[in-house]
Image: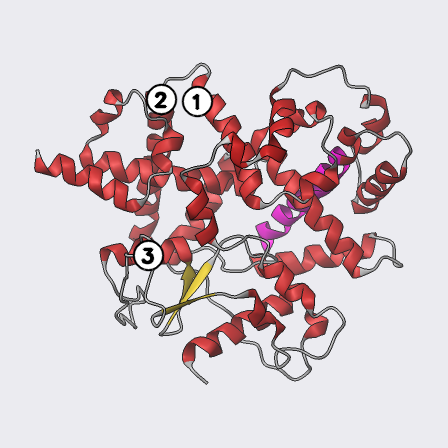
Amino acid sequence: MSTNISCLETFALNILKDSSPEKIASGINIPEVDSCSLCNQELFLFEIKKPFTILACGHIYHRDCIETSIKKRSICPKPDCKKKVESTVDSMPGSQNINDLMDISPTLFNDPQLYESSPQKKRASESVSVRETTTKKIKKADGRKDKDYPMLKKLIEELKSSNSSSSTASQTEYITRPGNFTDLYDAIIKAEERIGSTNQEVIRAYFLFRKKLEEKLAEYIKTNKERKAQRLLTKEVSAQLPSDLSKNAVEKRIERARKIYDLFTTIGEDKIERVKSYSALRISKLSWDEIDAIVEKFEEAEERIGSTNQEVIRAYFLFRKKLEEKLAEYIKTNKERKAQRLLTKEVSAQLPSDLSKNAVEKRIERTRKIYDLFTTIGEDKIERVKSYSALRISKLSWDEIDAIVEKFEEV
């Protein structure tokens, strides 16, 4: 068996071990999968949030991380590997020769050799494809307009409207201060079944359920590694939910809650009260590209109201600068991976507790391109920016960033 296929099987088994351990045949030894060594973040933890790539040498990285790395040096970044990776930029900036690396296909997880026969085999592949492949997303990114998302127009308009008087305040008050997952789950069921319940009521029930999950996970992570923390959380939730609930029913509602929570923690929980025509089910069926499109509309509005482009760009720049300085301090007395963990812990402790991990990661990623550009051409150049927002700069490809830098070097 080739090295990369072996790595894929190991990765698949780790996914099954954490999400559906009953699907793994007994007696199988499952080695741990390292995190992405370029960003020090887990490749998989309960769910796959970022596309990843496996090189021919068998090492696995987040796709964005490896594409950025090979633009500087076309070799595997692992210190003990350094195998050459041929980059073919004809098709897409940062893409690689198909013989050098392999994108993950959801069909891999249907391999019957990986686990025993089960009527739920399909679930493993479904969990892998939550975030669709980046190729499709890259093609859409530059030309994203309102007309590309006609179904979203009404939802975006509602979310941007002024708050109407809430008719659901008294109905939903009982779920705003829940004590456990049983209360939260019951609130979802009752809101969905109640005749005349509003969309806001059901959406808020899902939002609060996911919020409680995130809070409990954060508690467990304080004293446990992330993977163990996730297992402890799963155990606690299962113990509190009705015993006659099928695993499939619970998983569907948890996944539904995730999209709702990620959307409204990013644009603001108060926006739930503005929703009129969209149900929780419809929001949960939006693709991640469509959710990103909604978020972008709000972030663009943020930049137009009350802040100049320079202000926003400088805020992102200074945030990244502080990250780099603190990381450099930790690296003086720790190995790079431990230094990164210590930095992540410090940053998380200082940011608002109600911020979703997804919202934080997006803004941190945005700071990277802004910081790299203006540290190279000069921080003072921020004051010259007039028409470009921080959002537009963060959407530039690395090739476009390099082209800007080259123009300054020519002068």
| Residue 353: image location, x then y, percent | 58, 35
Q: Earlier in the sequence, mark 1 or mark 3?
A: 3
Q: What mark, if any, has residue 303 been given in the picture?
A: 1
The 10 Å Cα crowd at callout 2, few under 14, some 14 to 19, many 20 or more, is many
Furthest residue to the left? 411
Where 113 sits versus 240, above or below?
below
Q: Which label sits on residue 327?
A: none
* Left or right: 2 as drawn, with respect to 207: left
- Disc 2 marks a residue whose amino acid type is Asn
Q: Quadrant of the C terminus?
A: top left
Looking at this view, name the residue that lies furthest to the right.
Answer: 195
Residue 403 in view (yes/no) = yes
Identify which residue, 337 or 388, lies in the foreground. 388
Q: Which residue is mark 2?
A: 309
- Residue occupying the point 49% across, 68% down: 33
Of mark 2 and mark 3, the one earlier in the sequence is: 3
| Amino acid carrying mark 3 in the image | Ser
Q: Which residues are magenta?
A: 203-223
Q: Secondary structure at mark 2?
A: helix
Residue found at x 53% / y 70% = 11
Which of the two labelled residues, at mark 1 and mark 2, occupies the earlier sequence position?
A: 1
In the rendered structure, does residue 205 fall within the stretch colored magenta?
Answer: yes
